[in-house]
Amino acid sequence: MPTAILVDNSRDKPRLKQILIRHSYKVLAETEECKEVLALYDRYHPDLVLIDVSMSDGKGLECLEDLHKMYPQAQFIVCSELSDIRLLDRCASLGVMDFIQKPLLHRLSSALEKLDNDN
């Protein structure tokens, strides 16, 4: 069973979790604080980190950069309301598997299917 960490502080969080579960992911941890993500990743080494870059502490992109630096093999899907071209380019340079713009959460299912097929 693939594993995931969910990093989101929006009202979409329960729906994101349900989509992960429906695709047979075991959600090992949920957080709303980017400062906790590195410790959670270090503890669990999940197959996927589903992360929103617009977090309450304002450090979502920094968190993603730190994770990529420390764990270059980590797999990420970003799910965010933000979507300017610089952010998309930065995410691509960090190896993000897919970028889902909220509220288009139905796209997460196809991203997870593609990820499963690639592994």
Image (tube, grey):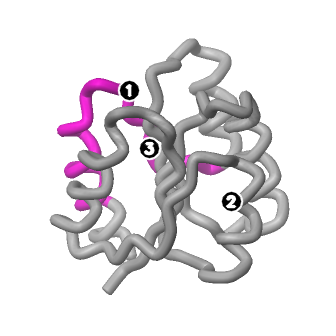
- Looking at the image, is mark 1 or mark 2 nearer the viewer? 2
Q: In this view, does 30 lie to the left or right of 68?
A: left
Regarding mark 1 in the picture, which secondary structure is present there? strand
What is the magenta range?
A: 95-114
Q: What residue type is labelled 3?
A: Asp
Q: How far apart are marks 3 and 1 (CA)?
A: 10 Å
- Coordinates of residue 36 in the picture (x, y in percent): 72, 59
> Which quadrant would the C terminus be assigned to in this image?
bottom left
| Discs 1, 2 touching: Cβ within 8 Å | no
Q: Is-magenta flag for residue 54? A: no
- Coordinates of residue 24 in the picture (x, y in percent): 23, 75
**Residue found 53% across the figure and 38% down from its top:** 52
Q: Is-magenta flag for residue 103? A: yes
> Which quadrant would the N terminus be assigned to in this image?
bottom left
Residue 60 against residue 51 in the figure, above or below: above
Labels 1 and 2: the sequence-earlier one: 2
Residue 82 against residue 58 in the figure, above or below: above
Q: Distance between the residues labelled 1 and 2?
A: 21 Å
Regarding mark 2 in the picture, which secondary structure is present there? helix
Residue that numbered label 3 is attached to: 98
Give residue 118's quadrant in the image. bottom left
Q: Residue 37 carries which label?
A: 2
**Residue found 74% across the figure and 46% down from its top:** 63
Q: Which residue lies furthest to the bottom in this view?
A: 1
Q: Distance between the residues labelled 2 and 3?
A: 19 Å
Regarding mark 3 in the picture, which secondary structure is present there? strand
**Residue found 60% across the figure and 82% down from its top:** 44
Q: Is residue 109 left or right of residue 41?
A: left
Q: What residue type is labelled 2?
A: Val
Give the crowd class for mark 3: few <14, some 14-19, many >=20 residues within 10 Å. Answer: many
Residue that numbered label 1 is attached to: 101
Along the line of sight, which residue is nearer the eye, 29 or 76? 29
